[in-house]
Amino acid sequence: MRTLTTATFADKCGINTPARQAEVQRVLALAQASGLEWTRLVWCDVHGNLRGKTWVTSELATAFAEGMGMVSTLLLKDTSDRTVYKVFEADVKNELPGFEGASNVMMLPDPNSFKILPWAEKTAWLLCQAWFPNGEPVPYDSRRILQRALGKLAAKGWGMKCGLEVEFHIYKLRDTEHGDDADPSQAAWPGPAPQVSMIHPGFNLLNELWFDRAEPALRIVKQTAQDLGLPLLSLEIELGPSQVEAVFKATDAMTAADNMLLFRSAVKQALRRAGYHATFMCRPPFENIMSSGWHLHQSLYDLSSGQNVFSRTSSQDIQEAEALRTDDARHTLSNLGAHYLAGLLAHAPGITSLCTTTVNGFGRFQPNALAPQSILWGRDNRGAMLRVVGGPGDAATRIENRLGEPAANPYLYMAAQIFAGLDGIEQTLPAPPATDAPYAESAMRLPLTLGEAIEHLGEDSVLSSSLGADFVRYYQRIKMSEQHRFNNAEDKVEFQRREYFGRI
């Protein structure tokens, strides 16, 4: 007699493949063998923050099959956690179908993302993606946008590799038990930021003595990253007071984006338990600080051979490159790589709000600050927006985009690179000469505010088409809420202290 089986929600969504089922069984067996009690089912919001619920591990099989309901307004929050859309008004169904009445969306865990958390006892972690209850994908899920971008690359036979250089700040909490942010009489929306002291005094780049002072905190960072299997390469003392940098080996783009998300969250939690406060806010609210950037190294590779298609490595390529001026992009990059570079430059105003995503981050675009100010590229030039690293014969030749801030949503940051770079390739855009004066007044400036950058995104027809016009309108509305509230804040420093320093 044939056994009838009931279709699951994963079946309804079309993702319950034999490969996924096998991975689910592996994870369930590992969870049981490891004696896990909790599993955090988390999802990345539009700002790059993790949200979710913690399930008892005995119910994990149900989560894989039927998903987890989550209030849909979590997709509609600004950085203060205020819901930007009026979901209880009748016309929201026309503007944002599927979100009426703060209804549920469903989260399905990706079994390949399973991690056992080293700092939390008997606790696992799974990354989820959002679906409507009818089995349709939620188009505002940022991880899905990167998946779509990578699909466009794969259709041409290419993949993307990314290496991460992430600057951030670590402080020592002055009072872990009774600080301002734990005082119920001071609770607010958002609440006060914690009181902190520095782990090193700064302004002595890569100083060994400063590293030794910061070593207890950095040891926690190192051990946490390694226990999670993240490809950490080095931890370094940056120029600013209490500022550090983590450098990671290159991986495929989706792995790099997932790793960035996990690294930020893990570091903040592990350090908090040891009495520290880590922040990925670009410019902490103190005098005499240095801005933090997220420098994204990127190249495309051939999916069949694994070869870097930005490199000039054949004898003919090298010979052609050496015949060109050194300020010609084709001297360092392949023709394809030069067109990709030109695409990043052509769409720089539009992609800025996807790379620098907070009001605070735009304070970083200042002259002579090892941060970009203008839309330029340079050969091994850290003042330019795009730094091209490598050259003829170097199989690791790549483009480093120095536009990003460490709080950015990694999926949107990387997808923006792909959409802009692909347009440069498809339109065979020529790259301008390299700059040797990245802070020249005559150069075209980057947007000066989040609001200005958001406007440029809406005006870029290529990005609007690639991201989806609905997504661009949605993103503009959510980020403009942040800009408007900042504009109206009486104390703009306190706004940033509460909005960013205590929360990201």
Image: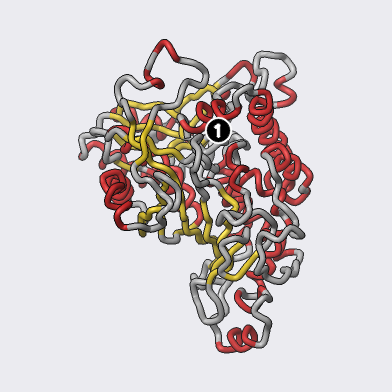
Circle 1: is it few (<14), some (14-19), or many (20+) Cα within 10 Å?
A: many
Can the viewer see residue 392 in this picture?
Answer: yes
From the image, tell me which residue sits under label 1. Answer: 131
| Residue placed most toward the observer, 493 or 405 | 493
Quadrant position of residue 347: bottom right
Q: Residue 289 placed where, x, y %?
A: 49, 43
Can the viewer see residue 74 in this picture?
Answer: no
Three-letter amino acid code at the position of disc 1: Trp
Q: Residue 307 placed where, x, y %?
A: 51, 73
Q: Residue 267 placed where, x, y %?
A: 36, 41
Q: Would residue 39 be found to the left or right of residue 342 on screen?
A: left
Q: Residue at x 78, y 48 (%)?
A: 461
Vertical order, 473 against 347 (above or below): above
Q: Residue 260 placed where, x, y %?
A: 45, 47
Total number of numbered discs in the rendering: 1
Q: Residue at x 51, y 26 (%)?
A: 498
Q: SS at mark 1?
A: strand
Quarter that holds the N terminus? top left
Colour option used = secondary structure
Q: Residue at x 58, y 21 (%)?
A: 82
| Residue placed most toward the observer, 185 or 34 | 185
Q: Residue at x 30, y 50 (%)?
A: 222
